[in-house]
Image (spheres, grey):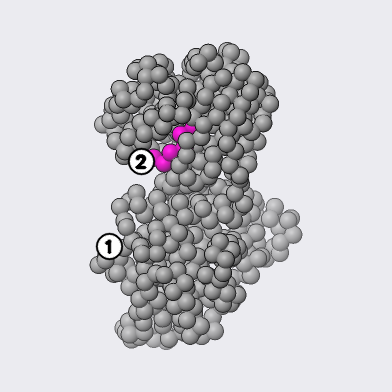
C-alpha cells in the first residue's frame, strides 16, 4: 500500500516565496497524515501560467532556487512531486521528485499544448525520458498535464516500463462540464494500461482563467476511489495499491452551482492578486449588474463592495427602486449619482456638430460614457476596482458601449450568455432561500434604458434564439451553413454572424473576465480585427 496526498493548492504567479511556503505547509500536513508521497500542481513554484515571465532568465533561476528551498526544508522521509521550470536554454515544464533531502529525479513534460489558452511551445522544450520512481515499494510514473490526455503517450510508455501507479500534475483550467470529461479520460488511461491514476489539479483564479481543482484518483479498473472538492484548497489523502484503495469522494457540483463558484473564485483571486481590496459596480437595477453584485459580495464580502446608481432622464422608477432593494438585500453601500447634468451638458456641447442629424445611438451612448466616467473617477479617487457588468451575448454582438459600460478593470460575466445569467440569478436566490435578487429584476424585460421605452429586443433577437446561434458560431466554430442546418433561420444566422465579426475591435479593448465556456473571447479566440471573411 502507498498513501498518497494530492495537494490541491492555490498558487500565485510570480510569488515564488509564497508558493514555496505553501508547498512546505502542505508537505508537513501530508507528513503528519502518514503520506508516502505528496504531489503538487503543474509549475507549482512559479504559479501557472507564468507566460512571458519565462523569457526572463532571472525568473527561471529564482524558481530553481525556490525548488532548492523545498528540498532543504521538506520532511526527508516523504516523497514530494513538485512542478517547476527546469533547464536554461531550452527550459522545460517539469516535475521534480524529491526525497531524502535531494532531488531523486526530474520528469520533463513531453506533450506541449498549443491550442485554446495554451501557448507552451512558445516557451518550453519537449522532454524525452520516462523515469520510474520507487515509493514504498510501489513503482510510480510521473507525468505533467497534457501527457496523460493522449492514449499513445508517455503514460503508456511508463506502464510498459513497469509503473503501477501514475501520478499526473496539472494546471487544467475550468470550463463548464470539464470535470466529467477529465474523469472519463483518466478512467480510460487507467483501464487501458492496468494502472492506478492519481491526478492533482491547481485551484484558483489567474487573470481570465479559473482552475477548479477536482483532484482525483482512480484504480486500475478505472473506478473512482478519491476526489477532492472543486474550487477550494485541499489535501486529498488516500491509499492505493496492494489490491485495496480508499479515500474521500467529494460530490460533484450541479452545473449552475459549478459556474457560479467559478465566477466567485475567479473574481476573488483577480481582485486580491492584483492588489485591490474593494470593488465598485454600476448598479442599474437590471439582471446583469445584480448578478455581478451577488458574485462580488460572495467573493469579497459586502463591506468590500460598493455600488453607484446613476439615473438619467430615461431611467425608470422601477429600476431605481430595484437597485436600492438589491443593495439593501446584500448589505452594500449604494451611492446615487444622477448623471442628468453631465448628460445635458454633453448634448449641448455636441449640438453644433450633431446639427442636421437625427437623434440615435450616438446620443444614447453619451449616457453610458458619462456613467463610465463617473465610475472610473470614483475608482481613481477611492482606489476601488470597477467591475463591469456586460454579458457574453452583449460582448458577442457589440451590444455594449466602448468607453461606457465596457469601462472597468474586470468583466465578471463576460463569458456568461444572457440566458445563463438568468439561471445563475435564480440559483443565487435558491442559495439565499429568498429573492435576494428581487423578482422584479428577473422578470422585467431587459433594457439598457438609454431612450424612452427601449428594450434589448428592439436591437437583438430574443436571447433564447440568439444564445444558441452564438454558441454554435463562437464556441463550436461552425460555419453559417452548418448553423442553418440545425434549424435556425438563415437571415438571422447571417445577421448574428455579422454582428459578432464587426464587434471584434470592441472586444479587443475590453477588460479580462472569468472564462467559463469552452471557448471564451480573449485568450481562446484570436481573430483579426480587419477581416472580410464571412462563412
- Nearer to me, 493 or 84: 84
Question: Residue at point 53% right, 18% down?
Answer: 140
Question: Residue at point 33% right, 26% down?
Answer: 70
Q: Are marks 2 and 1 in contact (CB under 8 Å)?
A: no
Q: Identify the image quadrant of residue 308.
A: bottom left
Q: Identify the image quadrant of residue 373.
A: bottom left
Q: Quadrant of the C terminus?
A: bottom right
Q: Distance between the Cα atoms at labels 2 and 1?
A: 23 Å
Question: In the rendered structure, does residue 327 fall within the stretch colored magenta?
Answer: no
Question: Residue at point 61% right, 44% down?
Answer: 251
**Main SS of the magenta segment?**
loop
* Range covered by the magenta-colored residues: 6-13
The mark that comes first in sequence, 2 or 1, is 2
Above/below status of 453 relative to 193: below
Q: Which residue is mark 2?
A: 13
Q: Estimate the x, y position of residue 83 in percent, counting from the top left.
A: 41, 29
Q: Residues within 10 Å of mark 2 (few under 14, many from 20)?
A: many
Residue 93 seen = no
- Nearer to me, 293 or 313: 293
Q: Quadrant of the N terminus?
A: top right
- Nearer to me, 27 or 500: 27
Q: How many marks?
A: 2
SS type, badge 1: loop
Q: Estimate the x, y position of residue 529 in percent, counting from the top left.
A: 46, 55
Q: Estimate the x, y position of residue 84 in percent, counting from the top left.
A: 38, 29
SS type, badge 2: loop
Question: Residue at point 46% right, 84% down?
Answer: 314
Q: Estimate the x, y position of residue 512 in percent, counting from the top left.
A: 42, 54
Q: Which mark identifies residue 383?
A: 1
Amino acid at each position: 500500500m502507498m498513501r498518497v496526498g494530492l495537494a490541491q493548492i492555490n498558487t500565485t504567479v510570480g510569488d515564488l516565496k509564497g508558493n514555496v511556503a505553501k508547498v512546505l505547509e502542505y508537505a508537513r500536513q501530508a507528513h503528519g497524515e502518514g503520506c508516502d508521497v505528496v504531489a503538487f500542481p503543474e509549475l507549482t513554484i512559479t504559479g501557472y501560467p507564468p507566460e512571458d515571465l519565462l523569457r526572463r532568465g532571472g525568473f527561471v533561476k529564482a524558481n530553481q532556487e525556490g525548488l532548492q528551498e523545498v528540498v532543504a526544508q521538506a520532511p526527508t522521509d516523504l516523497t514530494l512531486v513538485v512542478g517547476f521550470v527546469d533547464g536554461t536554454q531550452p527550459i522545460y515544464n517539469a516535475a521534480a521528485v524529491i526525497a531524502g533531502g535531494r532531488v531523486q529525479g526530474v520528469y520533463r513534460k513531453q506533450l506541449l499544448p498549443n491550442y485554446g489558452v495554451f501557448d507552451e511551445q512558445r516557451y518550453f522544450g519537449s522532454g524525452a525520458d520516462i523515469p520510474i520512481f520507487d515509493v514504498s515499494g510501489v513503482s510510480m510514473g510521473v507525468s505533467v498535464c497534457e501527457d496523460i490526455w493522449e492514449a499513445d503517450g508517455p503514460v503508456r510508455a511508463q506502464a510498459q516500463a513497469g509503473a503501477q501507479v501514475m501520478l499526473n500534475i496539472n494546471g487544467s483550467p475550468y470550463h463548464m462540464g470539464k470535470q466529467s470529461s477529465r474523469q472519463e479520460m483518466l478512467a480510460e488511461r487507467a483501464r487501458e494500461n492496468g494502472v492506478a491514476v492519481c491526478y492533482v489539479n491547481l485551484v484558483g483564479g489567474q487573470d481570465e482563467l479559473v482552475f477548479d481543482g477536482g483532484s482525483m484518483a482512480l484504480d486500475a479498473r478505472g473506478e473512482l476511489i478519491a476526489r477532492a472538492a472543486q474550487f477550494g484548497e485541499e489535501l486529498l489523502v488516500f491509499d492505493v495499491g496492494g489490491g485495496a484503495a480508499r479515500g474521500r469522494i467529494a460530490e460533484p457540483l450541479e452545473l449552475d452551482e459549478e459556474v457560479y463558484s467559478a465566477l466567485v473564485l475567479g473574481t476573488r483571486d483577480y481582485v486580491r492578486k492584483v492588489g485591490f481590496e474593494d470593488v465598485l459596480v454600476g448598479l442599474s437595477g437590471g439582471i446583469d449588474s445584480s448578478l455581478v453584485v451577488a458574485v462580488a459580495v460572495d467573493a469579497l464580502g459586502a463591506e468590500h463592495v460598493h455600488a453607484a446608481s446613476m439615473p438619467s432622464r430615461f431611467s425608470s422608477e422601477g429600476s431605481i427602486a430595484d437597485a436600492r432593494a438589491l443593495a439593501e438585500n446584500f448589505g452594500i453601500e449604494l451611492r446615487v449619482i444622477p448623471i442628468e447634468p453631465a448628460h445635458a451638458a454633453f448634448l449641448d456641447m455636441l449640438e453644433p456638430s450633431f446639427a442636421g442629424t437625427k437623434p440615435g445611438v450616438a446620443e444614447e451612448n453619451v449616457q453610458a460614457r458619462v456613467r463610465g466616467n463617473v465610475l472610473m473617477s470614483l475608482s481613481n479617487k477611492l482606489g476601488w476596482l470597477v467591475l463591469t457588468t456586460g454579458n457574453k451575448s452583449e460582448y458577442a454582438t457589440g451590444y455594449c458601449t466602448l468607453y461606457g459600460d465596457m469601462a472597468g478593470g474586470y468583466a465578471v460575466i463576460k463569458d456568461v450568455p444572457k440566458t445563463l445569467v438568468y439561471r445563475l440569478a435564480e440559483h443565487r436566490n435558491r442559495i439565499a432561500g429568498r429573492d435576494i435578487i428581487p423578482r422584479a429584476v428577473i422578470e422585467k424585460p431587459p433594457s439598457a434604458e438609454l431612450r424612452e421605452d427601449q428594450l434589448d429586443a428592439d436591437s437583438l433577437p430574443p436571447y433564447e434564439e440568439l444564445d444558441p446561434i452564438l454558441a454554435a458560431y463562437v464556441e463550436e466554430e461552425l460555419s453559417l451553413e452548418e448553423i442553418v442546418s440545425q434549424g435556425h433561420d438563415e437571415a438571422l444566422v447571417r445577421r448574428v454572424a455579422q454582428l459578432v465579426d464587426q464587434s471584434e475591435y470592441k472586444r479587443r479593448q475590453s477588460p479580462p473576465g472569468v472564462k467559463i465556456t469552452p471557448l471564451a473571447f480573449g485568450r481562446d479566440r484570436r481573430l483579426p480585427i480587419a477581416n472580410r471573411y464571412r462563412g
